[in-house]
Amino acid sequence: MKGGWVYIMTNAAHGTLYIGVTAHLAARITQHREGRGSEFCREHGLTRLVYAERHEEIELAIAREKQMKAWKRQWKLRLIRKQNPYWRDLYENINT
Protein backbone atom coordinates (compact mmCIF):
# COMPACT_ATOMS: atom_id res chain seq x y z
CA MET A 1 0.00 0.00 0.00
CA LYS A 2 0.95 3.62 -0.50
CA GLY A 3 2.00 6.01 2.19
CA GLY A 4 -0.29 8.52 3.82
CA TRP A 5 -0.49 11.80 5.67
CA VAL A 6 -2.15 12.93 8.87
CA TYR A 7 -2.80 16.67 8.81
CA ILE A 8 -4.37 19.44 10.84
CA MET A 9 -6.35 22.33 9.38
CA THR A 10 -7.44 25.48 11.21
CA ASN A 11 -8.94 28.91 10.59
CA ALA A 12 -6.54 30.86 12.84
CA ALA A 13 -3.79 30.35 15.38
CA HIS A 14 -5.33 28.41 18.28
CA GLY A 15 -8.64 28.30 16.38
CA THR A 16 -10.91 25.42 15.45
CA LEU A 17 -8.96 22.26 14.56
CA TYR A 18 -9.68 19.51 12.04
CA ILE A 19 -7.58 16.35 11.85
CA GLY A 20 -7.67 14.39 8.62
CA VAL A 21 -5.86 11.64 6.75
CA THR A 22 -5.10 11.31 3.05
CA ALA A 23 -2.84 9.58 0.56
CA HIS A 24 -2.50 12.78 -1.53
CA LEU A 25 -1.82 15.75 0.74
CA ALA A 26 -1.62 18.54 -1.83
CA ALA A 27 -4.84 17.50 -3.57
CA ARG A 28 -6.74 17.10 -0.30
CA ILE A 29 -5.65 20.46 1.10
CA THR A 30 -6.59 22.12 -2.20
CA GLN A 31 -10.07 20.60 -1.83
CA HIS A 32 -10.39 22.02 1.68
CA ARG A 33 -9.19 25.46 0.59
CA GLU A 34 -11.70 25.52 -2.28
CA GLY A 35 -14.61 24.42 -0.05
CA ARG A 36 -14.78 20.94 -1.61
CA GLY A 37 -13.21 19.11 1.34
CA SER A 38 -15.04 18.09 4.47
CA GLU A 39 -18.29 19.75 5.47
CA PHE A 40 -16.75 20.58 8.86
CA CYS A 41 -13.87 22.50 7.25
CA ARG A 42 -16.27 24.31 4.94
CA GLU A 43 -18.63 25.31 7.78
CA HIS A 44 -15.81 26.59 9.99
CA GLY A 45 -13.65 28.18 7.29
CA LEU A 46 -10.68 25.91 7.93
CA THR A 47 -8.28 26.67 5.10
CA ARG A 48 -4.92 26.85 6.85
CA LEU A 49 -2.71 23.72 6.94
CA VAL A 50 -0.72 23.95 10.18
CA TYR A 51 0.54 20.39 10.66
CA ALA A 52 1.39 17.43 8.44
CA GLU A 53 2.90 14.09 9.32
CA ARG A 54 4.03 11.53 6.71
CA HIS A 55 3.64 7.78 7.21
CA GLU A 56 5.06 4.99 5.05
CA GLU A 57 1.74 3.12 4.98
CA ILE A 58 -1.78 4.57 4.80
CA GLU A 59 -2.90 2.17 7.54
CA LEU A 60 -0.38 3.73 9.91
CA ALA A 61 -1.63 7.19 9.01
CA ILE A 62 -5.22 6.12 9.70
CA ALA A 63 -4.24 4.68 13.08
CA ARG A 64 -2.37 7.88 13.96
CA GLU A 65 -5.35 10.02 12.92
CA LYS A 66 -7.64 8.05 15.24
CA GLN A 67 -5.11 8.37 18.04
CA MET A 68 -4.77 12.14 17.60
CA LYS A 69 -8.54 12.68 17.39
CA ALA A 70 -8.85 11.10 20.84
CA TRP A 71 -6.30 13.51 22.34
CA LYS A 72 -7.13 16.47 24.54
CA ARG A 73 -7.08 19.81 22.71
CA GLN A 74 -3.99 20.97 24.62
CA TRP A 75 -2.02 17.97 23.35
CA LYS A 76 -2.97 18.85 19.77
CA LEU A 77 -1.98 22.49 20.27
CA ARG A 78 1.37 21.41 21.74
CA LEU A 79 2.02 19.16 18.73
CA ILE A 80 1.33 22.01 16.31
CA ARG A 81 3.46 24.51 18.25
CA LYS A 82 6.37 22.06 18.31
CA GLN A 83 6.46 21.74 14.51
CA ASN A 84 4.98 25.11 13.55
CA PRO A 85 5.37 27.63 16.42
CA TYR A 86 4.11 30.59 14.36
CA TRP A 87 1.08 28.70 12.97
CA ARG A 88 2.18 29.44 9.38
CA ASP A 89 0.07 28.05 6.54
CA LEU A 90 2.16 25.13 5.26
CA TYR A 91 0.20 24.78 2.03
CA GLU A 92 2.86 26.49 -0.09
CA ASN A 93 5.51 24.09 1.26
CA ILE A 94 3.75 20.91 0.13
CA ASN A 95 5.72 18.96 -2.43
CA THR A 96 3.23 17.91 -5.11
Image (cartoon, rainbow, N blue to C red):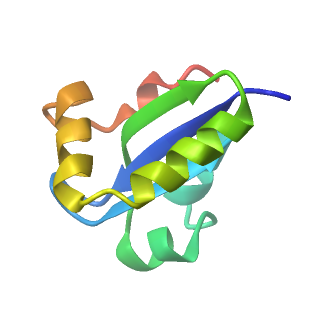
- Residue drawn at 26 percent across, 26 percent down: 83
Q: Position of residue 51 (x, y in %)?
A: 37, 37
Classify residue 74 as left or right of residue 37. left
Residue 93 at x, y percent in the picture: 44, 23
Relative to 84, 67 lies left or right: right
**Picture quarter containing residue 87?**
top left
- Label total for image: 0
Q: Does residue 26 show up?
A: no
- Residue at the image point whose x is 67% and y is 21% from the top: 56
- Res. 78 in view: yes
Residue at 25% in and 39% down: 80
17 to the left or right of 42: left
Residue 8: horizontal and vertical position, in percent? 40, 48
Q: Return the residue found at the far right.
A: 1
Which quarter shows the N terminus?
Answer: top right
Q: Is residue 2 above or below residue 12?
A: above
Is 93 placed above or below 81 here? above
Above or below 27: residue 45? below
Q: Residue at 72%, 39% (x, y): give it.
A: 59
Quadrant where the C terminus lies? top right
The percent coordinates of residue 68 (x first, y second) are 41, 50
Of residues 80 and 31, the one drawn nearer to the viewer in this rendering: 80
Place residue 32 in its image quadrant. bottom right
State which quadrant residue 79 falls in: top left
